[in-house]
Image (tube, rainbow, N blue to C red):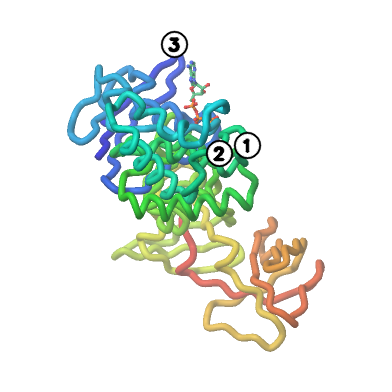
Amino acid sequence: MIAFQDVHKYYGDYHALRGITATIKAGEFFSLLGPSGCGKTTLLRTIAGFEGISSGAVMIDGKNMAGVPANQRPTNMVFQSYAIFPHLTVGENVGFGLRRAGLSKAELAARVEEALAMVGLGGYGARAAHALSGGQRQRVALARALILKPKVLLLDEPLSALDKKMREQMQVELIRLQRQVGITFILVTHDQEEALVMSDRIAVMFEGEIAQLADPETLYRRPNSRRVAEFIGTMNFLPAQVISEADGKIEVEAKGFGRATLDAEQAPGAHSGEGPAVGFRPETLTILFEGQTSTDRETTALIEEVVYYGDMTYYDVKLDGTDRAVRISMRNVFGRPVLEIGTRTRVAWSPGALVLFR
Ligand code: ATP
């Protein structure tokens, strides 16, 4: 549906996009994820045609978009700041882009109602737009974009102004909506959780480049660099040494764990020159309570910090033989005590959950 071919963008001397090459499939929910200033909004705007590019090509549906103005592209954009007209009704806001499309009054009203129903605002057409809540405004903005039946819907941090509960609800609704209408959604977000929840695939961007493009599970389980690993969720690192490498197996010696054999796919990244380390997510280690056994490998550790979250507890523990604490997350079980700082404990771990960075 969309192809970026070695796209570069300069703002004066500032190199905002540094050779973006990627394709986005039709019907996909695709996210651009990265910290503030990495260029994700700029990249989104190059699709919409709000931003020209310095070199390379942006293709939509096989056509080079060079010189094609925004209003002639099969895209529509929903902004963070909804840009609702407060003096119009909800229905007039939603129908705004169709007012010159030559539809009869009845046709227009039907299209408006159809779009409102899609976003869960059926029957709201006559309401005053200024009286809506933040979540409702966001829905109106969505309906206003959807009514034009774009092939691609571009969403620039559309949920960032909503509170946490509302945001989570809208995330689920957006996914459902996308499945229902089947058009390509491209979301810009700096919120890694939001990207993981919503996307079929995610491009993680740093400093104008795509660092990794993959589905959420691959990004989470097999990040290709420490930077991606740390941007998406929490990743613990322990210094390691590669002992040998042959036949798709890598033998490592990791501080705190000892020897472990990894599959080649557990080392998804290129050499970064930072020196080897193994990484693992907090939930892949298990604290073994009194009398518990595990089929995984075992080590011992000292609990240095306890953070209680209700459903979860985070334990920061120093594995024996290491000098920096790592974080373990444990789902709390009713009736089982939360361990205290200073407790010595056994910890189960699995070589299959490790990722090698080097
Ligand atoms: P945020 O989440 O903060 O919006 P972003 O990843 O979307 O960040 P962009 O808005 O794409 O980042 O901006 C990328 C870089 O380009 C930033 O350093 C920004 O300051 C710069 N930039 C963006 N627009 C312009 C402009 N019109 N003129 C000059 N520099 C710009």
Nearer to us: label 2 or label 1:
2
Inspect the image, locate mark 3, and give the three-letter code of the amino acid beneath it.
Answer: Gly
For the N terminus, the quadrant is top left
Element assignment for label 2? loop
- Mark yes or no: residue 166 visible: yes
Decide: few, some or many residues near mark 2? Use Cα within 10 Å; few <14, some 14-19, many ≥20.
some
Position of residue 346 in the picture relative to residue 304 (left or right): left
Q: Report the Cα–Cα distance between label 2 and label 1.
A: 8 Å
C-alpha distance separating marks 2 and 3: 45 Å
In screen coordinates, is 300 left or right of 201?
A: right
Q: Are marks 2 and 1 in contact (CB under 8 Å)?
A: yes
Residue at 47%, 49% in the rendered image: 122
The amino acid at mark 2 is Arg
Q: Which residue is mark 2?
A: 127
Q: Which residue is mark 1?
A: 131
Identify the disc placed on residue 12: 3
Residue 320 drawn above or below residue 232: below
Residue at 29% over, 32% down: 104
Considering every residue shown, the one lying at the far top of the view is 12
Total numbered circles: 3
**Vertical relation: 64 (above or below) 183:** above
